[in-house]
Amino acid sequence: MSVPRTAAPPVTAARGSATWRLIKTESTLCVRDKVGPLWGIGFPLILLIILGSVSDLRQPVEAGGGLTYFDLYVPVLILFNLAVLATGSLPTTLAGYRENGVLRRMRTTPVGPARVLAAQLVANFAIAVVAMVLFLAAARFGFGVDLPKHLLGFALAWLLAAAALLAIGLLIAALAPGRGPATAIGTVLFFPMMFFAGLWIPIPLMPPLLRNIAHYTPLGAGMRAFQDAFLGHFPSAVPLLTLAAYAVVCAFVAVRWFRWE
Amino acid sequence: MPPVIEVRNLHKRYDDKIAVDDVSLTVQEGEIFGILGPNGAGKTTTVECIEGLRMPDRGEIKVLGLDPLRERAELTRRLGVQLQAGHLPERLQVAEALELYSSFYPEPADWRALLEGLGLADKARTRYAKLSGGQKQRLSIALALIGSPRVAILDELTTGLDPQARRDTWDLIESVRSHGVTIVLVTHFMEEAERLCDRLALIDAGRVVMVDTPTGLTERARIGQRIQFRPSRPMDDRLLTSLPDVSGVTRRGELVIVNGNDNALNAVTTVLARNQIVAEQLRVEQASLEDAFVQLTGKRLDPGPR
Ligand SMILES: Nc1ncnc2c1ncn2[C@@H]1O[C@H](COP(=O)(O)OP(=O)(O)O)[C@@H](O)[C@H]1O
Ligand SMILES: [Mg+2]
């Protein structure tokens, strides 16, 4: 048996192709993992279709600025997707990588573990983009819900919400000692976050105290910004800044605390 | 030629537990250098310091002239590593892992041929989680070699492999070396060390007991041969203990057991013949590295890895 060696393959683009291949690999793994596609896309999409068929939900919400209950569920489900990725998919995978020595093994290669982490973020971001486009399209073409009237404002709000949520996912991965605890923390965070997004009671219908709290939670702030954009305004500064603050603070703490092994 | 790896007075502790007390060693270009010792001796900690995965508390390390901590980027390109405990994502397939890892290196080996050579070709589409322990081990050897490294450090290379797979792996390692790759082999298998290594460092309790060739080690332990026989008539032990080539005589029931150097057998048979004693049930054993190890450290090598 002899040791195979290629005849000096091109050295060029080795860096770029390694990063690209990592992103491709992590995306494939995310899809195989099923949490993202199933709970992050499939489940909310089915929910959207079911809710869209309930005629009672086509009533305008009081203090909802003319939006119907169903209209409000479209952004809620977009946030649902981000929340699943941030509390389920991302931290569980990363904490598992640390626990199983995947990141440690990467430390011995020229590429290093930070790029695995980045590739995971990109993969989850890609799934989120697909979900967001899919949900908007399904609502628009399936149930006649108008697209956000201020598209640019919506895009900005969504980007900030995605950044905030992925940073929260990173933070969970950084603080959880292992895969099990990461899953537990994620699950515990998921439900109150979704509550304040208005999954069970639309925010405009919440008692004032809860509504005020909601506005400063990541998903509540996201909801407020989305609602502005759906109604045709550029989202107001407070929710945008709230989202940005979550993104920056969580990412900063996560990076400070993240351990590779 | 400067040594490929140079470790001087390495010291590493975890909290209050000293893992490596004082280790110095040099590995020359092109050799297979073994690090042999019982569980908990500090072998893994030593090589992880060499790989730059752990920060030594004291001591100096140079690998290919590079500082493993400060010049990591350059080192990782030229050093292939098999970790004792290192894993891949559960859902990653064998071929995907090799393709991915080969994209990390400027001059990767042909991963398909590597797969073939390690007998994993039919597992190319199998997920990591579905591989047996031995198959995972072989994949991790493949990943250590995928970057065409100048130096490869393999920790507990054949632990978990069945005897046939172990021998195949040894063949692979020899062929890798024949291409000029320097190999550091961490092991607690005597047979592996004897078969593969040009030189060995015997490590015990965080210290190097000695560095020598496998034969040199057994010679130094002064247990060249063990001769065992049943004398045809009663005899006085002093007949044998007086021989310069004999280091010890013990009795087990009717059996006489003689330890001595490589000339002992000649000397013993001559003396017996002169006294008309026939050595019945005569057995001669070449002392193994294992015997040498016990002799030098007063310990046995444990069966399982850590
Ligand atoms: N991460 C760690 N934290 C604390 N103690 C450790 C750690 N790793 C190893 N040790 C201890 O250090 C000693 C040497 O371990 P190791 O280098 O793994 O030995 P070997 O590879 O020779 O079995 C052992 O007593 C082990 O328990
Ligand atoms: Mg070990």
Image (spheres, coloured by chain):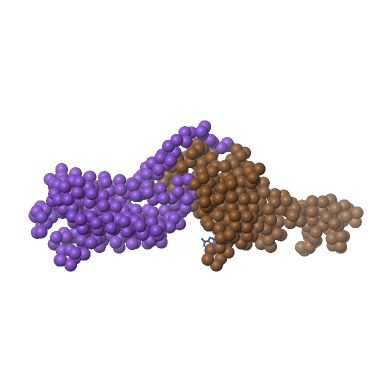
Chain colours: A purple, B brown
At x 63%, y 42%, the residue is: B30
Viewer-closest of B203 and B286: B203
Instruction: Please provide percent x and percent y for residue A182.
Output: 36, 59
Q: Quadrant of the N terminus of chain B?
A: top right
> Number of numbered discs present?
0
Viewer-closest of B259 and A28: A28
At x 61%, y 48%, the residue is: B5
Instruction: Please provide percent x and percent y for residue A173.
Output: 37, 57
Horizontal relation, residue A97 to residue B257: left or right: left
Instruction: Please provide percent x and percent y for residue B108.
Output: 50, 38
Horizontal relation, residue B106 to residue B193: left or right: left
Q: Quadrant of the C terminus of chain B?
A: bottom right
Viewer-closest of A122 and B278: A122
Residue A186 seen in the figure? yes
Relative vertical location of residue B145 with respect to residue B284 in this rendering, above or below: above
Residue B234 seen in the figure? no
At x 70%, y 51%, the residue is: B212
Question: Quarter containing ligand 1?
Answer: bottom right
At x 74%, y 55%, the residue is: B220
Instruction: Please provide percent x and percent y for residue A88.
Output: 32, 55
